Amino acid sequence: MLIALLGAGIPALVGAALHGHTGVPYRETRLYFGTERPGGAPPVGEREFDRFIDRKITPAFPEGLTVQPGHGQWREPSGRIVHETSYEVVLLYPDKGADERGVRIEEIRRAYRKEFAQDSVLRSDAEVSADY
């Protein structure tokens, strides 16, 4: 069966199954930043967002981060669906010290909501393993 799978062009799947867990415990936090502002104000622009990263996120996570542009939607409390450009920021950090990093993340979320008049910044967290 193993030979049949390898012959079918699936060596990566087999390799992952044979080697099991690698890496060390990390946390992955994804933050989703919307850009639409209330009252007809122009959306948060790319330069503004880049400056926010430089001032708020990079100092809190100097080891690195990933930013991905996106397009999303969400429902306002009024029920209106808002379609907007968004940014996803992915942070990976050691499980050890995750509580302190969580405080930094909440400060980032608060700062963005306040600076850009946002109702929220979505946060998702996962336990992962990572190896550099």
Image (cartoon, helix red, strand yellow):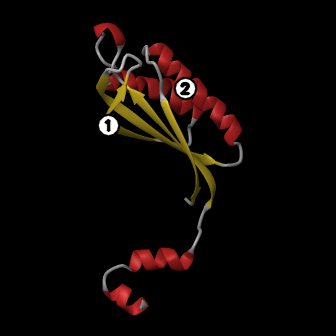
Q: Where residue 82 is drawn, which disc sits there? A: none
Horizontal arrangement in the rendering, residue 117 relative to residue 91 (left or right): left
Mark 2 surroundings within 10 Å by alpha-carbon count, few (fewer than 14), some (14 through 19), many (20 or more): many
In which quadrant is the N terminus drawn?
Answer: bottom left
Residue drawn at 32 percent across, 88 percent down: 7
Residue 9: where, in percent of width, then height? Answer: 31, 81
Front residue (pair 97, 80): 80
Find the distance from the CA under tag 1 to the CA under tag 2: 19 Å
Label 1 sits on a secondary structure element that is strand
- Residue at the extreme top: 39
Horizontal arrangement in the rendering, residue 75 relative to residue 91 (left or right): left
Q: Quadrant of residue 59?
A: top right
Residue drawn at 60 percent across, 63 percent down: 23
Q: Nearer the viewer, mark 1 or mark 2?
A: 1
The residue wearing badge 1 is 70
Front residue (pair 22, 56): 22
The residue wearing badge 2 is 108
Residue 35: where, in percent of width, then height? Answer: 35, 23
Tell me if label 1 and label 2 are in contact, CB under 8 Å. no
Check the image and report above or below for 37 versus 102. Answer: above
Q: Quadrant of residue 86?
A: top left
Residue drawn at 30 percent across, 10 percent down: 41
Q: Amino acid at mark 1?
A: Gly
Q: Amino acid at mark 2?
A: Ile
